[in-house]
Image (spheres, rainbow, N blue to C red):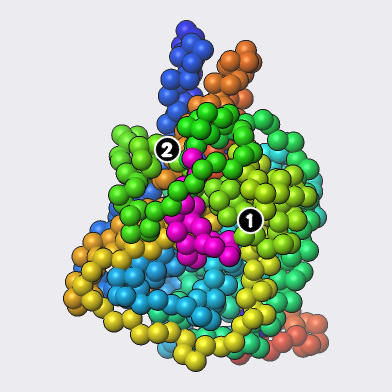
Amino acid sequence: MSQTPRVVVIGVGNAFRRDDGIGPALVRRLRERASVRPLPPSVALIDCDGETGRLMSAWEGAELAIVVDAAHAHPGHPGRVHRFDHEGPYTRPAATSSHGLGLGEAVELSDALGRLPGKLLVLAVEGADSSLGTGLTPAVAATVERLAETVEAEITLHRDARARNAGRHGGGGPRPTGG
Amino acid sequence: MTHRGSRVLHVGSLARVEGEGALHLTVDGGTVSGAELRIYEPPRFFEAFLRGRSYTEPPDITARVCGICPVAYQMSACRALEDACGVTVDGQRAALRRLLYCGEWIESQVLHIYLLHAPDFLGVDGAVELARTQRAHVERGLRIKQAGNAILEQLGGRAIHPVNVRLGGFHRAPTCGELKPLAERLRRARDDAWETVRWVAGFDFPDAGLDHALLALAEPGRYAIDSGTPTVMAAPGSCGVSAGTPASLPIRQFPVYAFSDETTEHQVPYSTALQATLGGERYLTGAMARFAISGRWLSPLAQEAAREGGLGDPLAGAVCRNPFRSIVVRAVEALYAIDEALRIIDAYEPPDRPYVDVRPRAGTGHGATEAPRGLLYHRYTLDADGIVTAATLVPPTSQNQGAMEEDLRRLVQDRLDAGEQDTDAELTALCERGIRNHDPCISCSAHFLDLTVDHVRRSPPCP
């Protein structure tokens, strides 16, 4: 890639573990929507299995990274979406448990190495079924369209803020539209 | 838990192991009476998923079995399907495949060395603490890993699930000019990989041995990665020598098509992965087996690194049977993969066509390649229209499961025999190290973000 994208949308998950596939499903939906209403070239849509190093590479240098992942919560409400906004120094949640390395560790590792994106937004969707198989359960599938709209709205917000900022500083920044 | 001299250790989620897994260890008095590694592995699902599909589909579908080693799955699938169809891919098309595979080796071995395994030797909790205390080392590891990733991007199209591979070769072959920037990065990565060997060779390694047969592909003239003949080195115990012996022991070979006859997969009640045995005995596949069987075919540079790293002289048949030293073997393999990638790029000329035609025919094909974690075997049966009627995938981790359990049993038993009064937590930590020595890939599963909602700083849920 010749230029670091300013905004990255990263869908984390495994499409062969049913609801774990929400991240890739969202990225696929965003691509479909972009074929009708194109996203600016400064936006990259990325599928990721959630491996730490690849996550870090995916968001390094971005102004805004939006990560969509599946989540377990206890007790769970399939289809409920949690939103984590992160800007500035990262504080490890007190009692997250993770096997191996994943999103939490990628955030911490990026932070320790000064490689966090300017702003990180995580949208975590509670799943009902993570067994082997394809297709999302209805409660999770029902979130895809709304999530796509949320992500597009966040991208627009970011571009607006950037444009206003550029205006305040004499308009020297890149154009807010088209790239 | 402790019950009158009996102890049961259960680790529900293994730290710094890729994916889902659990360990159950039972100590009865002074004896380890059980070591069970529970692995949740999905090949059976994929085998069913593949039946009824076109013979062109398994490379892409099986690449999604494992996010860590998608190229390995693609390559074993391609070899097996091409074997079924009577096609051989050679020349520059085969060289490009090997180059792609080198990219995966670099990424995977370096990930394990730096982010998962090194913390064990440095008294830190994990990669994050390592990054805070020894930042330059982690930066170096990530640089090497990104060089491997650059190969995957260039040849695979998408780093996670390469789409550029197809039966018979590639959809498109890169130009020489496209590979040139990779060489620049790889030369820098080669220096970093040398530093890595020196770094890990300086760690303290507990004494330990492996009393297992070793299984790896072998190919005269080069270090087997993308092809070769299954080769077995006998277990020390069967030769009357100690488990830690550095000596090369007798080897035998069998053709890839005999894999199912030579190995037996059986279900154990506590794990969804099938355990494999070779002639009724447990065996180990992976970096240590490859180094033992093919070390003499490493490049001169990698051989030099092996000697400097304390692994002995590969040309003289040196074998490393201390599983804690596997980190050094992986570092040597990462260096080799970079060196080999540079050699391939240097000799590259675009093939006249990116792929050869592969026409379906009824029959069964077999394919084996060396995934970073060990030998990965695929078998497919096709009907005359090229529809898959049967599929078998045997990943390295299930083959190694019995050997890993025996290692854990031995590690803990040695501590008990030495009269050490370890706490449950200490024994658990030791077992986790024992498992990480073998870099099991049990990530062929979901990577859920495990939410502990009460403790997580968050905004209100979305409407």
Between the C-alphas of marks 2 and 1, the distance is: 25 Å
Residue B219: in magenta span: yes
Q: Are marks 2 and 1 in contact (CB under 8 Å)?
A: no
Q: Quadrant of residue B21?
A: top left
Residue at figure coordinates x 38%, y 42% from the top left:
B278
Q: How many marks?
A: 2
Quarter of the image that includes the C terminus of chain A: bottom right
Q: Quadrant of residue B335?
A: bottom right
User: Percent x, y for residue A81?
Assistant: 45, 58
Residue at figure coordinates x 63%, y 56% from the top left:
B296
Please say if A106 is above or below B402.
below
Q: Which residue is mark 2?
A: B282
Determine if residue B146 is in view.
no
> The numbered mark 2 sits on a residue in which chain?
B
Quarter of the image that includes the N terminus of chain A: bottom right
The residue furthest top is B4
Instruction: Tell me the tag on residue A25.
Output: none
User: Percent x, y for residue B329?
Assistant: 65, 49
User: Percent x, y for residue B244?
Assistant: 61, 33
Tell which circle, 2 or 1, labels the residue nearer the N-terminal end.
Answer: 2
Disc 2 marks a residue whose amino acid type is Arg
Between B241 and A86, which is closer to the camera in this rendering? B241
Whether labels 2 and 1 belong to a single chain: the reply is yes
Determine if residue B409 is in view.
yes
Q: Which residue is mark 1?
A: B296
Disc 1 marks a residue whose amino acid type is Arg
Q: Report helix, strand or loop for mark 2.
A: loop
Residue at figure coordinates x 77%, y 69% from the top left:
B188
Q: Left or right: B413 with respect to B385? A: right
User: Which stretch did the figure color magenta?
Assistant: B216-234
User: Percent x, y for residue A171?
Assistant: 77, 88
